[in-house]
Amino acid sequence: MRAPGSYTALEEFGRVRLSRYFYMRNFLYSEIGNFHGVPNLPEDPDLAIAAGRRLAEELLDPLHETFGAVAIRSGYRSPRLNHFGATEVRPQKCSANPKNYAGHIWDRRDGKGRMGACVSVAIPWFADRYAAGRDWRDLAWWLHDRLEFHEVWFFPKLAAFNLTWREAPERRILSYIAPKGRLVAEAEAARRARYADFPPFRGIAMP
């Protein structure tokens, strides 16, 4: 597929279905792009679609099937849009482009040549419980034990998190919510007890 060069071409790109529940259009909205008039257009649509499809099928569909609605906060960013967010917007909202290759920039491989894609999401089912005092680590351990992600970063608002799929995943979970930093190991029984009341998992079990 060619890079969209017209409104109708962008429409067609947005109609590409990535998974059972998600289309490319779900991931194209950007507050920065909308407010500042910076188009969010891929340079390599085929790579963006391939990476987004793995993200949607392997990580987002199981979340949707287990918890219901998944709110997309930030998905795909073009190299141009991400660079603008990193250099022209204050407070800074985006990391430098090379750090976001195979992250929010789906149509560039990372420095190791890996394809990848990142999306910022909130899960309303859990956000309500988090607002009532639930620990973010309850969801973190559920993710750890259920999904084959590359990286997860939790944020204080809504217990939203960046969820990254990548080839040869490194499987790390970190948080800006106290206790900050990398998720500390817990005994299997203790971590499973954290999410014992979660809805039944619906998706492909990890090997």
Image (spheres, grey):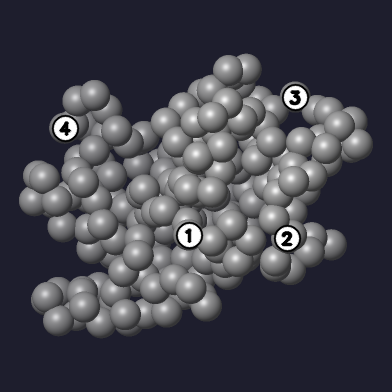
- Cα separation, mark 4 vs mark 2, equals 42 Å
Between 2 and 123, which is closer to the camera in this rendering?
123
As measured in the structure, the alpha-carbon distance from the residue carrying label 2 to the one carrying label 3 is: 23 Å
Amino acid residing under circle 1: Ala
* Res 118 seen here: yes
For disc 4, the marked residue is 88
The answer to whether the residues at label 3 and label 1 have Cβ atoms under 8 Å apart is: no
Q: Secondary structure at mark 3?
A: loop
Image height of 192 relative to 77, above or below? above
CA distance for labels 3 and 1: 28 Å
- Is mark 3 in CB contact (under 8 Å) with mark 4? no
Q: Earlier in the sequence, mark 1 or mark 4?
A: 1
| Left or right of 138 on screen, residue 107 | left
- Badge 4 density bin: few <14, some 14–19, many ≥20, Cα 10 Å: few
| CA distance separating discs 1 and 4 | 33 Å
Give above or below for 165 relative to 129: below
Q: Which residue is mark 3?
A: 184
Which residue is painted at 31% across and 53% down in the image?
A: 77
Residue 105 position, x and y percent, is 38, 53
Quarter of the image for the C terminus: give it: bottom right
Vertical comparison of 199 with 190: above or below: below
Residue 168 lies in what quarter of the image?
A: bottom right
Q: Work out whether residue 67 or residue 89 is closer to the camera in this orientation and state it.
A: 67
The earlier-in-sequence mark between 3 and 1 is: 1
Instruction: Estimate the x, y position of residue 60 in percent, counting from the top left.
Output: 55, 61
Residue 113 visible to an observer of this rendering: no
Q: Is residue 76 above or below residue 89?
A: below
Mark 2 — residue? 201
Per the image, the residue denoted by label 1 is: 69
